[in-house]
């Protein structure tokens, strides 16, 4: 049985949240995953205020792994769902050259995926807030 688009987004978001928890909670960085959750919750508003390209560039330039990882996860999803490049620079080049309709569709798909990850990420936390 084929999954709906929402089920595919939810599955991908869940898997990304589990991976983020595993990668970010190594050693002394036990709050790093909570920071990923907070970044996921705030990213849609940042995109709405500044734009997808600006937020992706901002996240790429940050030192903290949570921003890079969240953007990596979003680019992975957009690669699967919209056939955009996975790596940062080719992804940005793709957006720079995209027709307005394609750019809007990519941004809309980013919002759709972020709605899922911002709900799934807290759920993988023990005692998560959901």
Image: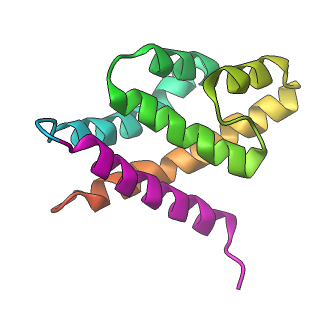
Q: Is residue 101 left or right of residue 124?
A: right
Q: Quadrant of the C terminus?
A: bottom left
Task: List x then y, in percent, for residue 91.
Answer: 70, 27
Q: Is residue 75 above or below residue 49?
A: below
Q: Check if residue 18 falls in the magenta segment.
A: yes
Q: Residue at x 53, y 21 (%)?
A: 55
As rendered, which of 87 and 32 lies closer to the eye? 87
Give the colouring mode of the picture: rainbow
| Count of labels in the image | 0
Q: Is residue 44 above or below residue 89?
A: below
Look at 38% across and 52% down and name the residue there.
19
Is residue 21 rendered magenta in the image?
yes
- Residue 8 placement: quadrant: bottom right
- Residue 7 lies in quadrant: bottom right
**Main secondary structure type of the part rendered in magenta:** helix
Quarter occupied by the N terminus: bottom right
Q: Is residue 61 above or below residue 27?
A: above
Residue 93 seen anywhere in this rendered image of the structure: yes
Q: Which residues are magenta?
A: 1-26
- Residue 129 spot, x, y in % from top left: 22, 57
**Residue 54: where, in percent of width, then height?**
58, 15
Given residues 65 and 43, the one toward you in this image is 65
Q: Is residue 50 left or right of residue 90?
A: left
The residue at the point 75 percent across, 37 percent down is 84
Rendered view: 98 above or below 20: above
Q: Residue furthest front?
A: 27
- In this view of the protein, can residue 130 be seen by the observer? no
- The residue lying at 23 percent from left, 41 percent from top is 34
| Image quadrant assignment for residue 53 | top right
Residue 111 located left or right of residue 61: right
């Amino acid at each position: 049985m084929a999954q709906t688009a929402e089920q595919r987004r939810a599955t991908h978001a869940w898997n990304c949240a589990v991976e983020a928890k595993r990668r970010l909670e190594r050693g002394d960085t036990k709050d790093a995953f909570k920071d990923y959750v907070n970044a996921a919750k705030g990213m849609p508003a940042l995109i709405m205020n500044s734009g997808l390209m600006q937020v992706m560039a901002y996240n790429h330039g940050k030192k903290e792994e949570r921003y890079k990882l969240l953007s990596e996860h979003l680019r992975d999803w957009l690669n699967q769902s919209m056939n955009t490049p996975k790596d940062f620079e080719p992804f940005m080049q793709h957006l720079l050259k995209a027709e307005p309709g394609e750019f809007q569709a990519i941004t809309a798909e980013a919002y759709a995926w972020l709605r899922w990850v911002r709900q799934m990420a807290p759920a993988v936390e023990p005692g998560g807030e959901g």
